[in-house]
Image (cartoon, rainbow, N blue to C red):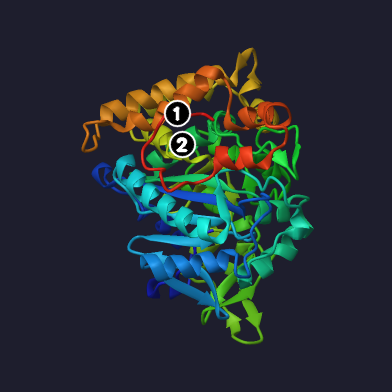
Amino acid sequence: MTEFIQTDEQLQEIESVGQLRTYFERAGKPRDAWRVGTEYEKLGVDARTGRAAPYSGPAGIETVLRELAERYGWEPKRESGRIIALYRDKASITLEPGAQLELSGEQCATIHCAQEEFSTHSREIASVGRELGIAFLGLGIQPITPIDQIELVPKRRYGIMAPYMETVGKHGLQMMKQTATVQANFDFADEADAMRKMRTTMGLTPIVTAMFSNSSILEGQLTGYMSLRGHTWTDTDPSRAGLLPFVFSESAGFDEYIRWALDAPMYFVMRDNQYVDLSGVPFRHFLKQGHVDHAHGTIRATAGDWALHLTTLFPEVRLKTYLEVRSADSQPPHLVLAVPALLKGVLYEDDCLEAAWDLVKSWNWEQRLSLYHDAHRQGLQARAGRIPLRDLARELAVIARHGLRTQGACNSRGEDETIYLAALDHQLESGASPARYVADNWERGWNKDIARLIAFSSYRASDSHPDTTVG
């Protein structure tokens, strides 16, 4: 979860709901300013046993952060004396609640830019991890360690979230402590463009989930799910997660998203660099009534509170000052950049965006919801009527490839961004997502050997150029 930094402008009190709409309207950008941001989460594990690396201790993730700062020029951020994040240039490294390591990358004009950053990040964490006996895995869920044996990162925000999560769903702590994802962020021109992109990517959720499903093993056993990470969101907190039905109305705009966000419960606000617990209070109530806090007196809602609240909502596609597509499990390194590449090809070319919507526009809400759940369990084998998702996934990849070719962004070798789809194309030809590949090999070919799973999914110093390897 990216660290939230409140600016002076965000201290302004909210006087009307119209200000909330302005927040989104001001975010629109001309096409030539559109960028792609990628957030890469990965799981730290003991390189010998596969058990989750703790946050604390000489072979823990805090030590990883300290070493990254000392060797590679990252600036540490501390909370109560503990390192909880790093900053360098336009990127940050933050920690999810179970010490999952997340790189929030630079806003890049091309995937080639993202690839350079990814290569550097892989080299740095692999170098430090190797010396500490820690491997970083591109998997959607911790494969060996139970929830109660995973240390919660000592951040105040997580201390507020964790107990509240246990009151609103069965899988909240699992989501917080065990799961990992790759998210891709995209700009929009205006309200109509934002909602068109949101509608399309929300509609594509089952397909994208299936393509990048990669969480079929938990506590050393096959789970019966291709994306157990995706499934955890279905019973985490229904008031803030999942698919949003109103998005599929052609008349939906910022106002509908604002109404939904106003009614969603809060976790906290920040005052004087401290979190104030408002867990369970709808933002709408806070906006109208304020909150009386013993340390700060009466607190009124500010622009910064709204911005922070938006980061604590978890629909499959999230609207902030950009769109966040959140449907993919964390990927093995050879597939990581396929996530932003696929979506850039679709979202940043008008005819491709329309073609992608054509794949899913005929489904009604009940069909979307059913397929959403089926994709978690069956992955690419799930069916939309008589059509397997793998066929729709192949069509989507063709659309994305056309979009990237049209955009024509080439690296120094003259290669366009379709090179980042090569491994994905190879995977789709076989019809096996990473989760299916792992599930098919775990009990038979690998004989439950954790070393084989680590070899398949771990970050290495040599992860510097896309290839077509699946396993």
Q: CA distance from mark 1 to mark 2?
A: 7 Å
Q: Is residue 316 left or right of residue 373?
A: left
Q: Is residue 288 left or right of residue 126?
A: right
Location of residue 69 (image quadrant): bottom left
Q: Position of residue 245 (x, y in %)?
A: 61, 38
The residue depicted at 33 percent of the width and 23 percent of the height is 402
Vertical placement of 101 versus 201: above or below? below
Viewport quadrant of the N terminus:
bottom right
Query: Front-most of 242 and 453?
Result: 453
Amino acid at pointer 2: His
Viewport quadrant of the C terminus:
top right
The residue depicted at 64 percent of the width and 28 percent of the height is 436
Vertical placement of 274 versus 358: above or below? below
Does the rendering let one see residue 224?
A: yes
Secondary structure found at label 1: helix
Tags 1 and 2 touching, CB below 8 Å: yes
Amino acid at pointer 1: Ala
Q: How many marks?
A: 2
**Residue 210, numbered label:** none
Q: Position of residue 451 (x, y in %)?
A: 63, 42
Does the rendering let one see residue 35?
A: no
The residue depicted at 59 percent of the width and 48 percent of the height is 180
Secondary structure found at label 2: helix
Query: Front-most of 245 and 355?
Result: 355
Q: Position of residue 62 (x, y in %)?
A: 56, 68
**Residue 334, numbered label:** 2
Q: Residue furthest top?
A: 386
Query: Front-most of 292 and 138?
Result: 138
Q: Quickly name the residue at label 1.
A: 423
Mark 2 is surrounded, within 10 Å at the Cα level, by few (under 14), some (14 to 19) or many (20 or more) other residues, namely many
Vertical placement of 272 versus 361: above or below? below
